[in-house]
Image (cartoon, grey):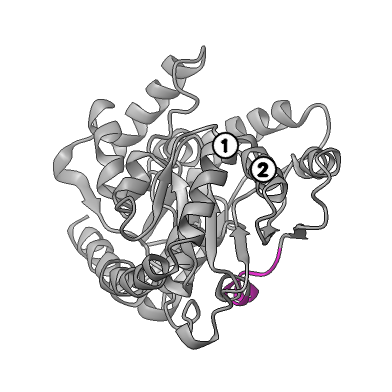
């Protein structure tokens, strides 16, 4: 099978998807994405590159000899893929909804892009059930929707309960440093923990446009002694950081199906995450993790302390979470299922 993929290949979960296709389907993969151009006119360049792709990418895909076209993110790469006229065409939604931010001046425009992409797609992938309502509200044909997480490599993201360090709170954050992920809430919670003399260290992994602002906030709050910034690291080095941690912290304002959460659950980091439909699908509050309200550093700090004083609950949750991801988020089982879907599309085109 030759696959043409349109999407952001630098993202770890996209890399997992493509790696699985190569490993289990022996697929030959060609990719295309909009190249980021820094500077004051970056948005203009992105729009121009998008327009160019709409009119020229279809020819490139056909000349590549591709058997199938895959795309991720409905309102951008999914729309571009739909405009190519190539079939079979698969589109995957990235978040709980790709029409984001909601209730903004751009909502009607993005909704129109999503509706067009859904109409043209031969198969629509949802990484979890929580994504489906948004798809249906935008006119997606329910008979085309397939629900299955990409999953993660559970051999890489594994741990030994005997080597977990329980001497202090060792939190880890693995989300991109952008506004949606609310790192400033975690930093403010860290200040509260320090004020209460709670033993804590937090490792913030990743990079993004807010790196300097967040570092400045940590300096202003005088918590540089308990915050570590690693910047972006290769995905194959991530498991060791998760295994060394005992809490996983993620407090975004929106969430779909998070590969980062799966990685934490597989590697034995107790999840404390925002209470959203996408997280409630995996985390049962006070059972296998804790759910916290959006934009509330006080609640996050209080919940971290509560978890810390319930180590038996945390240890039991780690075992439960490992079994859960083995059952539902193992990419060695899930990617071959997706390959069956793709092969069926190719045969029926």
Q: Toward the viewer: 302 or 25?
A: 302
The image quadrant that residue 214 belongs to is top right
Q: Residue at x 67, y 61 (%)?
A: 199
Say which residue label 1 marks: 298
Q: Is 15 situated left or right of 337 in this image?
A: right
Indicate which disc residue 222 carries. Answer: none
Q: Secondary structure at mark 1?
A: helix
Using the image, tell me which numbered label, if any, was put on residue 192. Answer: 2
Q: Is residue 129 above or below residue 28?
A: above
Inspect this view and state whether residue 6 appears.
no
Q: Secondary structure at mark 2?
A: helix
Left/right of residue 102 with respect to residue 172 in the rendered view? left
Whole-angstrom CA distance, mark 1 to mark 2, is 7 Å
Q: Residue furthest left?
A: 143
Percent x, y for residue 299? 51, 38
Q: Is residue 201 left or right of residue 254?
A: right
Residue extending farthest to the top is: 105
Q: Quadrant of the N terminus?
A: bottom left
Q: Quadrant of residue 232?
A: bottom right
The 10 Å Cα crowd at callout 1, few under 14, some 14 to 19, many 20 or more, is some
Whether the residues at callouts 1 and 2 have beta carbons within 8 Å, the answer is: yes
Highlighted magenta segment, given as a residue range: 233-240
């Amino acid at each position: 099978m030759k696959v043409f993929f349109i999407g952001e290949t630098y993202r770890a979960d996209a890399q997992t998807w493509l790696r699985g296709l190569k490993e289990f389907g022996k697929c030959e993969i060609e990719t295309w994405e909009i190249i980021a151009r820094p500077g004051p006119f970056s948005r203009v360049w992105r729009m121009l590159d998008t327009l160019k792709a709409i009119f020229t990418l279809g020819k490139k895909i056909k000349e590549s000899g591709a058997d199938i076209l895959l795309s991720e993110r409905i309102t951008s790469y999914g729309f571009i893929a739909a405009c190519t006229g190539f079939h079979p065409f698969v589109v995957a939604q990235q978040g709980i909804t790709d029409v984001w931010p909601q209730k903004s001046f751009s909502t009607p425009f993005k909704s129109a892009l999503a509706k067009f992409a859904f109409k043209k797609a031969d198969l629509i992938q949802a990484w979890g059930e929580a994504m489906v309502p948004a798809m249906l509200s935008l006119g997606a044909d329910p008979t085309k929707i397939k629900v299955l997480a990409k999953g993660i490599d559970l051999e890489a993201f594994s741990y030994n309960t005997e080597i977990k360090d329980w001497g202090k709170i060792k939190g880890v954050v693995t989300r991109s440093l952008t506004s949606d992920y609310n790192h400033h809430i975690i930093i403010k919670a860290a200040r509260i923990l320090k004020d209460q003399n709670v033993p804590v260290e937090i490792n913030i992994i990743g990079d993004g446009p807010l790196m300097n602002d967040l570092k400045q906030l940590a300096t202003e709050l005088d918590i540089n002694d308990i915050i570590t910034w690693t910047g972006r690291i290769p995905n194959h080095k991530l498991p060791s950081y998760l295994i060394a941690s005992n809490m996983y912290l993620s407090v975004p304002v929106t969430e779909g199906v998070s590969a980062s959460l799966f990685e934490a659950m597989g590697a034995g980091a107790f999840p404390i995450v925002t209470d959203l439909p996408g997280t409630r699908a995996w985390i049962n509050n006070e059972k296998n993790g804790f759910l916290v309200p959006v934009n509330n550093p006080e609640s996050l700090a209080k919940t971290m302390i509560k978890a810390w004083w319930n180590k038996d609950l945390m240890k039991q949750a780690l075992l439960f979470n490992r079994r859960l991801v083995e059952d539902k988020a193992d990419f060695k089982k899930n990617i071959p299922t997706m390959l069956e879907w793709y092969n069926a599309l190719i045969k029926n085109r």
